[in-house]
Image (tube, grey):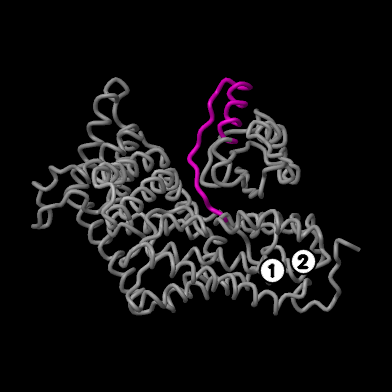
């Protein structure tokens, strides 16, 4: 019998130290993200054992409970209700989806509990190494874009469906309405980026949104910068991000210098004026150049070095996630979607998940007598097929070490497959970011239509599954690499 969101939330609250230990609550695509005051009060193993929890990622002051798409929204709502009842205060915080992990290592005793312990140790090491200014900045930028993903997904699916109707000539009375619904958010996405940027970086959100709104205002066509008339939307989300960051800086400068009696009048006025003029006469132009360069570079990379580009992107995505550097790709994805209608990078990166699934299947086949590991893989595999790879990564491949490397090999092979077709002129893209695995199919499109894009993507997934499986099956013996000692089975 499936556990209700209320039961899951009720079980989690005391295990994370109770209401007094929770400083913030948020969720992303798959995780309930809790800010905690004291990590020592969190019973991580008990949280992991709660029915409905797929995995746990523990950071220094954040606990990420992997629940899965859809279910996490309901559990978060129930958890917030319990907190509100207990404390009378609503908890909110920016969220991101930043799976990560440390460099792989070996594990002598690979039962389910041993893997969980080893995975927790590796993640703790990774968290200490991840506390750098660059990675902190990247995570904050991810905090800006991740809350936009649900709208990107919904509008992306509708845009793809509308494209099918238009191409087929069906429901012509409905397609204009669907086009308006699907395109409205993208037309104003810069405003949302500006609002979130100011919120994340400590400014007044509405001032960030007000400055970013300049980027999409039609009247900018009357403004000339560097001898060229501006275009509405020029610079896109990158321009909005830069404008809002500047607004935060100007606002902070004003707060420390403007008398309190005049703050409510002068601070917002100066913030919008200074950041707005800088946006019109510098940031929009510069961001437009950068945005155009990103689109040109992505198309050139795939058209000329498709298999190599796919191999590198698909093979290195899991290590990028480990290092926390994958957040830098979120604004690039968003820029490509805004420019071209889809991002050609996401289908390549999604191949990393296919290699992970293949590696997990090989471990399952290899460890025939290890019932605990096989049970873990069986429970996590459906989520992995749908693009939720954390349970397999943190519960199986990272602690075992070598399967993580062979999963990367599977991802590289799948990426090379998709990249090969890009050289032939068949680009595969996603109209939104967020899902991967089988869940990405409704968002697929390309320069030659969604049907061909789906076929190429499916071929890449199968290639990733196969290579990840074979590489793992042939190289993994169930023990520590280069360690001749026998591997203990949980069945003995």
**Magenta stretch bounds:** 75-99
Q: Nearer the viewer, residue 321 or 379?
A: 379
Q: Is residue 74 visible?
A: yes
Relative side of 438 to 36, left or right:
left
Residue 400, given in percent of the width and then of the height, sits at: 72, 66
Q: Residue furthest right?
A: 492
- Return the residue nearer the eye: 287 or 10: 10
Query: Residues at badges 1 and 2 in contact (C-beta under 8 Å)?
Result: yes
Residue identified by numbered label 1: 401
| Residue drawn at the location 50% of the way across and 47% of the way down | 96
At numbered mark 2, what does the secondary structure look like: helix, strand or loop?
loop
The disc at residue 149 is: none
474 in magenta = no
Q: Residue 212: in sight, yes or no?
A: no
Front residue of 422/400: it is 422
Crowd band around label 2 with a 10 angstrom C-alpha radius: few (<14), some (14–19), many (20+): many
Q: Quick check: 101 left or right of 337?
A: right
Q: Quadrant of residue 49?
A: top right
Residue at the image point whose x is 72% and y is 37% from the top:
41
Nearer to us in this view, 25 or 153: 153
Asked whether, in this view, residue 67 is left or right of residue 11, the answer is: left
Where is residue 316? Give x, y as percent: 52, 69
Q: Residues within 10 Å of mark 1 (few under 14, many from 20)?
A: some
Cα distance in 3D space between marks 1 and 2: 7 Å
Tell me residue 73's x, y (percent).
54, 38
Q: Quadrant of residue 407?
A: bottom right
Tell me if residue 79 is in the magenta stretch. yes
Label 1: element kind: loop
Residue 309 drawn at (x, y percent): 42, 75
Disc with the residue nearer the chain's start (1 vs 2): 2
Instruction: Give the labeled residue for mark 2.
Output: 107
């Amino acid at each position: 019998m499936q556990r209700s969101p209320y039961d899951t939330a009720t079980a989690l609250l005391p295990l994370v130290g109770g209401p007094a230990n929770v400083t913030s609550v948020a969720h992303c695509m798959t995780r309930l993200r809790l800010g905690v005051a004291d990590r020592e009060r969190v019973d991580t193993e008990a949280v992991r054992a709660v029915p409905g929890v797929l995995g746990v990622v523990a950071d220094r002051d954040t606990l990420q409970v992997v629940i899965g798409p859809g279910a996490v929204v309901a559990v978060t709502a129930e958890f917030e209700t319990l907190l509100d009842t207990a404390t009378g205060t609503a908890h909110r915080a920016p969220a991101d989806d930043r799976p990560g992990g440390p460099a792989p290592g070996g594990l002598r005793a690979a039962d389910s509990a041993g893997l969980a312990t080893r995975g927790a140790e590796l993640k703790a090491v990774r968290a200490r190494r991840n506390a750098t200014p660059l990675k902190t900045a990247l995570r904050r930028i991810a905090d800006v874009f991740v809350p936009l993903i649900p709208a990107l997904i919904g509008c992306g699916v509708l845009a793809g469906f509308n494209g099918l109707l238009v191409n087929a000539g069906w429901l012509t009375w409905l397609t204009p309405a669907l086009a308006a619904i699907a395109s409205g958010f993208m037309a104003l996405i810069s405003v949302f980026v500006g609002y979130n940027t100011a919120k994340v970086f400590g400014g007044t959100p509405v001032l960030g949104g007000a400055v970013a709104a300049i980027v999409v205002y039609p009247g900018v066509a009357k403004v000339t910068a560097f001898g060229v008339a501006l275009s509405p939307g020029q610079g896109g989300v990158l321009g909005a991000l830069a404008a809002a960051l500047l607004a935060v800086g100007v606002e902070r400068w004003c707060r420390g210098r403007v008398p309190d009696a005049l703050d409510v009048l002068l601070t917002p006025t100066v913030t919008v004026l200074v950041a707005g003029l800088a946006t019109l006469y510098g940031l929009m132009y510069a961001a437009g150049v950068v945005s155009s360069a990103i689109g040109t570079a992505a198309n050139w990379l795939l058209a000329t070095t498709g298999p190599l580009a796919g191999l590198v992107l698909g093979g290195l995505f899991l290590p990028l996630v480990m290092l926390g550097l994958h957040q830098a790709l979120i604004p690039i994805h968003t820029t490509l979607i805004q420019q071209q209608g889809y991002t050609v990078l996401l289908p390549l990166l999604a191949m990393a998940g296919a290699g992970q699934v293949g590696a997990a299947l090989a471990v399952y086949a290899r460890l025939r007598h290890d019932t605990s590991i096989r049970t873990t893989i069986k429970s996590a595999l459906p989520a992995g097929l749908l693009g939720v790879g954390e349970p397999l990564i943190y519960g199986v491949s990272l602690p075992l070490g070598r399967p993580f490397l062979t999963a990367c090999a599977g991802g590289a092979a799948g990426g090379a497959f998709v990249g090969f077709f890009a050289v032939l002129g068949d680009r595969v893209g996603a109209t939104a970011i967020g899902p991967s695995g089988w869940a990405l199919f409704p968002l697929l499109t390309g320069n030659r239509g969604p049907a061909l894009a789906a076929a190429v993507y499916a071929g890449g997934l199968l290639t990733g599954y196969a290579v990840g499986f074979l590489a793992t099956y042939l190289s993994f013996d169930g023990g520590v690499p280069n360690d001749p000692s026998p591997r203990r089975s949980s069945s003995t």
